[in-house]
Amino acid sequence: MKLNRLRFGLSTIFLLISLGCASTKMVKNWVYPETGPLQFEKVMALVLVQDTFVRRTGEDEMVRQIKQAEGVAAYTVLPDRGLENESMVRKAVEESGVDGIVVMRPVYDRQEVSYVSGGFPGTYNSFYGYYGWAYQISYSPGYYRSDRLVGVETNIYDVKTEKLVWSGVSQTTNPKDVKKVVAETARAVRSVMKKYGFLS
């Protein structure tokens, strides 16, 4: 599925990119000081976007990526029209029986242009080596490339205390579809949480 259907607010968020492959890395994260190992039994996956297709696709993929607890896609208990109603959200969360919530939200979508320098063959080291190559135009010129960078904020909440226990922002370069973005983001988050001992 090409990403020109996927929207967040007034701007597109996950667009088809022609250059390069998608890659995701964590660029920042924050941990609540008293957070210990997370042992949620049932976790709600919530993607905050206005596009219904993106929301459902993202939440389904998040559920697939939840490995150590039962996952619940938020759209199965919380309709799109109820997202703006805090009391309805609170009721849905309570009735679902979840003890943890993972929320993903796109926070930026920008284009970045960078210059990739060219190179010279080793024969440039001597005059005669160069002379033998000169007529073949062996110099490899540099070029400019354009990449799309998409930032996704992920927050993890403890339902019982209602507190944020972990927050991070990941950056994906040249995303091609929402499933891959969510899957890569989930893996990046899981890797960081294992590093801090929150997951085994």
Image: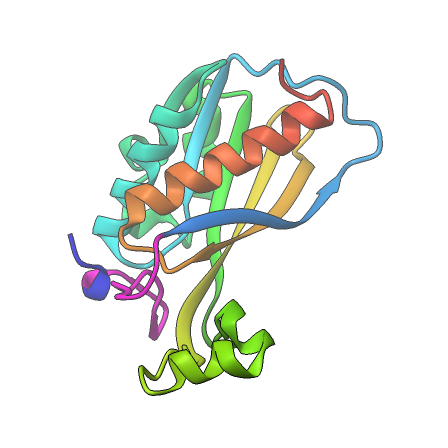
Using residue 34 as the reference point, say whether residue 138 is left or right of it.
left
* Residue in view at x 46 percent, y 65 percent: 149
Residue 141, position as x, y percentages in the image: 42, 82
Q: Confirm whether the magenta stretch covers residue 14.
A: yes
User: In which quarter of the view is residue 109 placed?
Assistant: bottom left
Q: Residue furthest right?
A: 33
Q: Which color scheme did the rendering employ for the protein?
A: rainbow
* Residue in view at x 56 percent, y 36 percent: 189
Using residue 42 as the reference point, say whether residue 133 is left or right of it.
left
Q: Residue furthest front?
A: 128
- Viewer-proximal residue among 66 and 81: 66
- Viewer-proximal residue among 114 and 151: 114
- Residue 86 visible in image: no
Range of magenta residues: 5-21
- Does 94 appear above or below 125? above
Q: Confirm whether the magenta stretch covers residue 54.
A: no
* Residue in view at x 48 percent, y 33 percent: 187
Using residue 148 as the reference point, say whether residue 34 is left or right of it.
right
* Residue in view at x 25 percent, y 63 percent: 16
- Does 9 appear above or below 96? below
Residue 172, position as x, y percentages in the image: 46, 54
Residue 152, position as x, y percentages in the image: 50, 53
- Does 155 appear above or below 123? above
- Residue 76 visible in image: yes
Locate the C terminus and report the quarter of the image it occupies: top right
